[in-house]
Image: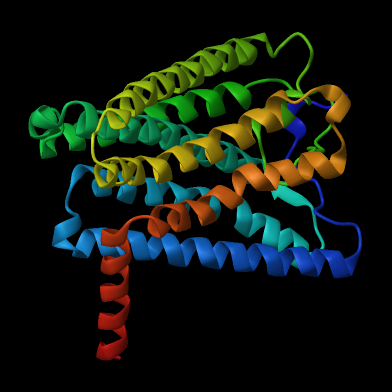
Amino acid sequence: MSNSSSIRHFLLLALADTRQLQLLHFCLLLGISLAALLANGLIISAVACGHRLHTPMFFFLLNLALTDLGSICTTVPKAMHNSLWDTRDISYTGCAAQVFFFVFYGVTELYLLTVMCYDRYVSICKPLHYGTLLGSRACAHMAAAAWASGFLYSLLHMANTFSLPLCHGNALGQFFCEIPQILKLACSQSYLREFGLLAVSACLIFGCFVFIVFSYVQIFRVVLRIPSEPGRHKAFSTCLPHLAVVSLFLSTSVFAHLKPLSMSSPSLDLALSVLYSVVPPALNPLIYSLRNQELKAAVWTLMTGWFWKH
């Protein structure tokens, strides 16, 4: 039996058992993180510098890129450090920081994706009211609400999780600090509060999911009534990247946490945790850039301009 007051560090799950695989994982994580940093950095710079991209859709995309940058910087550097130096340690405060920022960026991203869905709904279903409903002030308020909600939500979870007494050691079954893994270490009679918060979280996530589904049902009904094929194609092209990002974000995280116990295995759990925590921040910029000509043109202009200056 151990008490949380005596715990000074946690032991994270090792990505591999052999030195060669550890170095391979380090290289893979390094490549993915550099790709995510470069891609999201380009989107942020292109939207900030390109006056043609100062629209609600790209403003929310800039905020989404910021959450992706924060998310990849929360989990990957420590995993790379542990793989490179063959260690599993993370300090108590470092673990608390990881929990806070992982929840913060994840919740903020979910809210931003919901707001971006509302942007697409107004753009296609209520185009005459677009300027009124999504003016610059309204967009700033929605983005600020997403960030503030994520901050308060993560602060509440982090404070509640790390106030629980721990009775089952300090070894976590994950390569980064995550609330469900810490709850497994808590004394059996003490984690009901956190389960209550997680139930509220599930309701909030379900509410966002229902809003997104309902919005896209309305969007597709309107798009399918557009008489011209180019018009339908243009409308679909503005929605498909967002729909792909939402699907990737929700499907990987929901399946990882709600899969049947019969399917659970250490290697599968590890692969799924990498899939929902590391891959989306690297793929999101690619998904948005592939089908958006304005964004591709702005990124290309930014890159060529930088090249000629140097």
Quarter of the image containing the C terminus?
A: bottom left
Q: In this view, does 161 lie to the left or right of 43?
A: right
Q: Would you place residue 107 above or below residue 207 in this image?
A: below
* 202 vs 224, nearest the viewer: 224
Residue at position x 46%, y 58% from top? 286
The percent coordinates of residue 252 (x first, y second) are 63, 37
Q: Is residue 202 left or right of residue 138?
A: right
The percent coordinates of residue 12 (x first, y second) are 77, 45
Q: Is residue 11 visible?
A: no
The percent coordinates of residue 261 (x first, y second) are 84, 23
The quadrant holding residue 217 is: top left
The quadrant holding residue 265 is: top right
Q: Would you place residue 268 above or below residue 20 in this image?
A: above
* 293 vs 258, nearest the viewer: 293
Residue at position x 23%, y 34% from top? 227
Quarter of the image containing the N terminus?
A: top right
* 75 vs 120, nearest the viewer: 120
Q: Can residue 275 be seen in this view?
A: yes
Residue at far right of view? 18
The percent coordinates of residue 77 (x first, y second) are 61, 59
Residue at position x 60%, y 63% from top? 32
Residue at position x 78%, y 37% from top? 172
